[in-house]
Image (cartoon, rainbow, N blue to C red):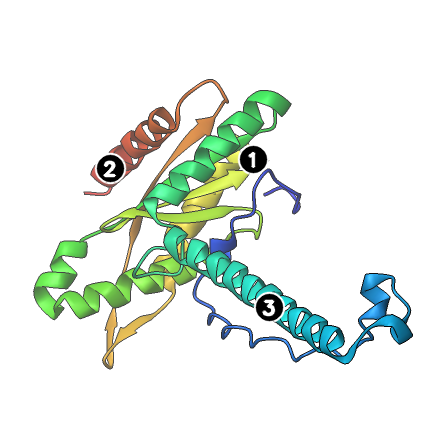
Amino acid sequence: MAARTKHPSRPASRRAGRAMPAARPLRARRERQDPSDYLGIPSTEISPNVRSAVMKLMDELDRLKAELTNAQHRMSELEGIADEDPLVPVLNRRSFVRELDRVIAYVNRYKAGACLVYLDLDEFKEINDALGHSAGDAALKFVATHLLANVRSSDIVGRLGGDEFAVILHRTNLALAGTKARQLETGISKEPFNYQGRDISLSLSTGVGEITGKESSAEVLERADKAMFARKKSKQ
């Protein structure tokens, strides 16, 4: 793979799975300053009543500024949550497709190489049927964590739905992307997945699609999906 490089978008949700910070407390009241500093009037010409009223207004302004800061911080947190998959610590389909659209535009403009790897967890239904949906959920989390740990921080990981994932590889050609896809397949099959004291073998089928900058996100996904399906059939 190429060395780490900057890329057109680094979604906050790549940090998904980390604990959200607590809401920021309101800032402590700032040290009182003389109202004359704000009014441009000598302090000797300000009556006690005016001074008191101005101080109250200054305190209220501080309170409103603090509430605005807290609201902006909370809005940022909620936007991050809206981008994350509800089960695993990666982007959901909507936000992943949005990032893919951005990468397509970037590739089209700067002629930078990029590829998409489409991944499907083999025999996922069998895991659910044999061990229950909690085991299936645990397997999906295991796969997501493995993907995040084995791609560059500049790459983007998303869950497309069910047992299907995708990874956008920046500054990568088709050959290198194919090598990375096989590495991910091999890695998940060798990494032990233990559920309630029982070792479960997992395997992935992958397909790669090149991002040329001339197609839509749907076309990129469809091309990689078809390659993944052909790979799955070849393993049967």
Secondary-structure class at tag 1: loop
Which corner quadrant of the image does residue 34 belong to? bottom right
Identity of the residue drawn at 58% across and 75% down:
26
Closest to the camera, between mark 2 and mark 3, is: 3
Closest to the camera, between mark 1 and mark 3, is: 3
Q: Position of residue 199 (x, y in %)?
A: 26, 73
Identity of the residue drawn at 28% across and 30% down:
226
The foreground one among 138 and 60 is: 60
In the rendered structure, which amino acid carries the disc numbered 2?
Ser
Residue 133, above or below 195: above
The foreground one among 56 and 16 is: 56
Asked whether residue 46 is in view, the answer is yes
Secondary-structure class at tag 2: helix
The foreground one among 168 and 69 is: 69
| CB within 8 Å, label 1 to label 3 | no
Residue located beneath label 2 in the image = 234
Residue located beneath label 1 in the image = 172
Q: Work out whether mark 2 precedes mark 3 in sequence or the reverse, and give the earlier one.
A: 3
Quarter of the image with the N terminus is top right
| CB within 8 Å, label 1 to label 2 | no
Residue 214, above or below 152: above
Residue 198, above or below 183: below
Query: What distance separates the C-alpha of mark 2 from that of mark 3?
Result: 60 Å
Query: What distance separates the C-alpha of mark 1 from that of mark 2?
Result: 25 Å
Secondary-structure class at tag 3: helix
Q: Position of residue 60 (x, y in %)?
A: 61, 70
Residue located beneath label 3 in the image = 66
Q: Position of residue 73 (x, y in %)?
A: 53, 62
Q: Work out whether mark 1 precedes mark 2 in sequence or the reverse, and give the earlier one.
A: 1
In the rendered structure, which amino acid carries the disc numbered 3?
Ala
Query: What distance separates the C-alpha of mark 1 from that of mark 3?
Result: 45 Å
